[in-house]
Amino acid sequence: MKTPSPVIDISLPLSPQTPAVPGDPPFTRRLVLSQAADGCEVAALNLSAHSAAHIDFPAHFLAGGKRAGDYPAAAFFLAAVVIDCGEAMRLGPDVLSGTALAAGDAVLFKTSNSRTRRFAGPDFPADFAALAPQLARELAARDLRLVGIDAMSIEPLDDPAYPVHHLLLAADILILEGLDLAQVRPGRYRLVCLPLAVADAEASPVRAVLLDDAGAQTS
């Protein structure tokens, strides 16, 4: 009998410590009803759609691009490959060397961001490991479904043209940002990263997890 696959939570948490992308509203949670005064607890959340672990849809950068409601729920259950990029700060096509990728895969890049907890907050880091356009072009040429990284942005914020976002989203490759891959070994997994059911969303927070089928035992 096969036991359930171990579940690895790879989501940066939402809290007052969560760094917001510069220009985005920070995450806040405000009580509007309390147990003491009202007999129940209700909170209001204020956050950017690009807070902590989140998916970018093509509409984030492309006029007329697809939004959350254009994807079925099944689109967020994916075969995934985690690639350890070591200490590289600008990830180029060389990080794919020796990794077998299949059509329909998701690719998640584990970088020094996880090891050094660059996105633990509360301040957004001045520099972080991210994709270079050359790698984005290589990924866009493959029949992939999603590219993710352990950073709040898949590319540095110093180029207002945002070439990495444009290259991937134009190829209908979803972008998953805000991951924590510190405890994840390289290899194959199943990725689950369901967005909120907000049809018009250009992006959405997710709870991203990896299912480690290789770690499941049979008896």
Image: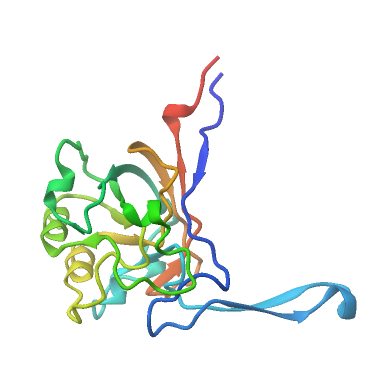
Q: Please identify the quarter of the rendering in which residue 147 is found.
A: bottom left
Left/right placement of residue 166 relative to residue 26 reads: left
Q: Nearer the viewer, residue 211 or 181?
A: 181
In the image as oriented, which residue stretches furthest toward the top?
219
Image coordinates of residue 184 in percent, x first then y, are: 41, 42
Seen at 45% across and 43% down, the residue is: 183
Quadrant of the drawing holding the C terminus: top right
Give the colour scheme shown: rainbow
Q: Is residue 206 above or below residue 166?
A: above
The residue positioned 27% from the left and 74% from the top of the image is 65
Looking at the picture, does residue 194 appear above or below residue 8? below
For the N terminus, the quadrant is: top right
* Figure quadrant of residue 160: bottom left
* Point 22% across, 40% down: residue: 102
* Residue at the image position 21 percent from the left and 63 percent from the top: 168
Q: Position of residue 19 (x, y in %)?
A: 46, 72
Q: Is residue 142 left or right of residue 114?
A: left
In the image, residue 114 sits, relative to residue 164, either above or below, namely: above
Q: Position of residue 194 (x, y in %)?
A: 47, 57
Q: Nearer the viewer, residue 182 or 103?
A: 182
Q: Quadrant of residue 27?
A: bottom right
x, y percent for residue 215: 46, 28
How many marks the image carries: the answer is 0
